[in-house]
Amino acid sequence: MEREPSRRRFVRGCCLAGAGALAASNSVGGVTASRRQEVPPTRWNRTYDQGTTAEANGLAPASDGGFVVAGTTESGDDAVSEIWLYKTSAAGRLEWQTTFAERGVTEGFDVAAVEDGFVVVGHTHEEGDSDQDAIAVRVDGEGTEQWRRTFNARPRTTDTMQAVTVDEQGRFVFVGWTSRFRDAWVVRMADDQSIDWAETYGPGDRNRLHGVVAADGGYVAVGETDDTTDDTAGWAVKLDDEGAQVFSQQFKKRSGDQINTYDDYNVLYDVAETRNGFVAVGANAFDPQTNDRRGWALEININGGKLWGTRVESDTHTVLRSVIGGNLEYYVAGETATNGSGDDARGFVANLGIEGEPKWQHSYGSGSSEFSAFHLTGGEGMVCVGSTAASAGGNTSGWGVKVGGEAVATATPSPTPTPSPTPVPDDGSTPTFTPTPTGEPDGTDAMGAGTSTPAPTPSGDPGTATPDGDDGGEATTTGAGGGGGLSPAVVGVGAVIVALGSAGVLYNRFLGDDERPDGSDGGADGSSSDGTDDGGDGGDDSPDPVETSEPDTDGTEEVQAAQTVVEGPDDVAEESEPDDETAE
């Protein structure tokens, strides 16, 4: 049944491989002869200060080359926190910002682009109240609210939505969890706010979904679940167009310990589609009580069978939060720190090859910083967003860094400069910009505090920009050396042959996707899952072609089964900077 779609995806992969091989030095991850590559230059590095604690959790590309970022900020009024939404130019300059408050606590976790705007997802509740609802806010391209909706799995439950994707029909799919049976929760909503379907899923006693992608006429979501040994296992579930479960797969990392042979903590935070199936990222820990974490990346085929898995680490605590597939490679971002308390925490970025092998990795920022999400910008690099603070526990600001791509042009002074509406301190070196500058030098954006009214409150204040320093949330040089792309390569016809040859290898692996590199069995048609359809309210009880079903328990519990897939030992991706290496 999957053979013909597999061929179509192979042909598409060959075209992308050939195009990537012919790309110039500005390509995003062109194939090179060397496994290890130089770290791309930092093009800009900006902070977005609300005056109180603020964090950036997700971003989506805008049609003009800029970015819209969603997060949470504290309020100075009656509300404790609000959804914070702001837009930057391609150079990272603030263009507008707005906030949304539904109840005392309103938090935003992810944002996705739609045809004429964006949709933000999160949760809202009164301070101290466990009755928490999911919230979705639809805005146009300028941040003006079109509609908002709160919804829950059941009245008086504690519900949240952590991620959103938009399918080809323009429908929103939200994933998160509910306190009802401690299950994962998925909702598909149309643009008119009507809910197509809402389902709960849960192979274990505690089930959460953190990331989702629309693919193959359905959706793949990843998260975590408690397995039969009371360990936390990474979890991937595929749903069809109606929300019926296609596969439910659990993954644990082998620890190397002779007594406790598998890590007790395994979680997946994000997922992206690949030529072979899907790649997911997260973290492992042998003992979660120690706060130690090791970054984790794995690829599964279209049926849930594992293709490869690897650890990606820099410091004692490394967590991968976001992943995107490039040209025969993958990009990941997250955080690395000396401990789980956020001491000496830095944003972390890595480039992995087709089998998860490291090409380059690097950390950014200082104090207590982390990346939550990123986006590839065509042939111009990657933009990462997150939060930064002077130290662990301090007030955080929104943070953005562009890695690789073209250098940001320095603004040319006008013969008759227009005074800025916001006075800039005269330190003898800081240029003054108009309210809507373009091509300006890098700097730190200080944004005015947002309002806490239920309606959006756009702010036109672009802040100030001051060239200052090299890293850690401050401005960086605009014309640093190095190539323009993330993985620069100058190639010719021979590279096309190499790229197509690599794609041929993919074809052989893909059409025989039940063969693992480590020799493990992927199950029927490459799958090793044994999960069931959700037996909960509104679920589809019809037999699934891949899974077997189990009935509800006395009508009060939703029971699922899923086989745990265990990865074999593999090499740890080493830090490219010797002083950041961590011995295993």
Image (cartoon, grey):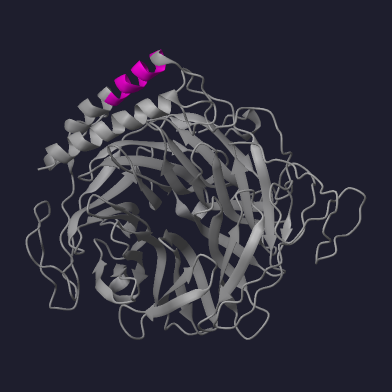
In the rendered structure, does residue 241 fall within the stretch colored magenta? no
**Res. 251 in view:** yes
**Res. 285 in view:** no
Q: Position of residue 253 (x, y in %)?
A: 35, 42
Q: Position of residue 190 (x, y in %)?
A: 31, 71
Residue found 32% across the figure and 30% down from its top:
15
Q: Is residue 54 left or right of residue 319?
A: right
395 vs 226, nearest the viewer: 395
Q: Position of residue 288 (x, y in %)?
A: 46, 53
Q: Magenta region's main secondary structure?
A: helix
In the rendered structure, does residue 500 fall within the stretch colored magenta? yes
Q: Is residue 192 above or below residue 175?
A: below
Q: Position of residue 103 (x, y in %)?
A: 51, 84
Q: Is residue 479 above or below residue 445?
A: above
461 vs 262, nearest the viewer: 461
Q: Is residue 62 above or below residue 147?
A: above
Examine the image and state in which quarter residue 149 appears. bottom left
Q: Where are the magenta residues, as a range? A: 494-503
Residue found 46% across the figure and 62% down from its top:
111
Q: Is residue 310 above or below residue 24?
A: below
460 vs 425, nearest the viewer: 460
